[in-house]
Amino acid sequence: MDPDEEQREQVRALLRRQSEEASRLAVAFGGAHGMHQTDVAALAAIAESRAPLGPATLARALRLSRPATTALIDRLEQGGHVLRRPDPDDRRRTILELQPAAHALAAAFFGPLGDAYQAAMGRYDLAELQVVARFLQDVIDVTVAARERIEIPAGGGER
């Protein structure tokens, strides 16, 4: 194998390993706090949403049926992680609001990881970080495209 291909294979192997470790971290976080992986994914989706997130949007984001989403939100609400609130812009809708306990839990668990990421990034200059950011965005884009090609729409059926 030539040096160029060797380097590319090393990068592919590292991407696989990082993906596996991120999955293991989510499982460990959920297990440490009595939550399913789907619960963890839902909390992340709610926390990262730029706009208030309702049950239907959460269902689409997680590729869940309505009944599964209702059960998920019930678990999160019973665990004190989220609260269902009327949407102030449309009182017929419900939005999901993270509770302070969920923010504190995430900060305690993921804060040190964020600090470690920051320390790792500190070893690179701005130009290197820009290359890494472009590369990671490209990897995310091709991963999303691959997922979308094989994904079954939420609730089953044809696309």
Image: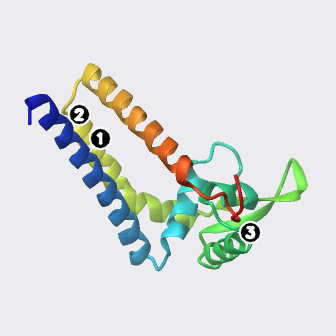
- Amino acid marked by disc 2: Gly
> Neighbour class for label 2 at 10 Å: few (<14), some, many (≥20)?
few
Q: Position of residue 43 (x, y in %)?
A: 56, 61
| C-alpha separation, residue under disc 1 versus residue under disc 2 | 6 Å
Q: Quadrant of residue 20?
A: bottom left
Viewer-nearest of labels 1 and 3? 3
Q: Nearer the viewer, residue 149 or 137?
A: 149
Q: Is residue 13 above or below residue 92?
A: above
Count of picture labels: 3
Q: Residues within 10 Å of mark 1 (few under 14, many from 20)?
A: few
Q: Which residue is under mark 1?
A: 118
Mark 3 vs mark 2, foreground winner is 3
Which is more N-terminal, label 3 or label 1? 3
The one of 54 and 56 positioned closer to us in this rendering: 56
Q: Nearer the viewer, residue 75 or 2?
A: 2
Amino acid at circle 1: Gln
Q: Earlier in the sequence, mark 3 or mark 2?
A: 3
Q: Secondary structure at mark 2?
A: loop
**Identity of the residue drawn at 14% across and 29% down:** 4
Residue contact between numbered discs 1 and 2, judged by CB atoms under 8 Å:
yes
For disc 3, the marked residue is 66
Where residue 45 appears, as percent x and y from the top left, is: 58, 54
User: Which of the 4 image quadrants contains residue 133?
Assistant: top left
Amino acid type of the residue that numbered disc 3 sits on in the rendered structure? Arg
Q: Residue at x 66, y 57 (%)?
A: 153
Residue 126 appears at what percent x and percent y?
28, 22
Q: Position of residue 65 (x, y in %)?
A: 70, 68
Helix, strand, or loop for circle 3? Answer: helix
**Label 3 environment density (alpha carbons within 10 Å; few <14, some 14–19, many ≥20):** some
At a point 46% along the width and 61% down the height, the residue shown is 106
Q: Quadrant of the N terminus?
A: top left
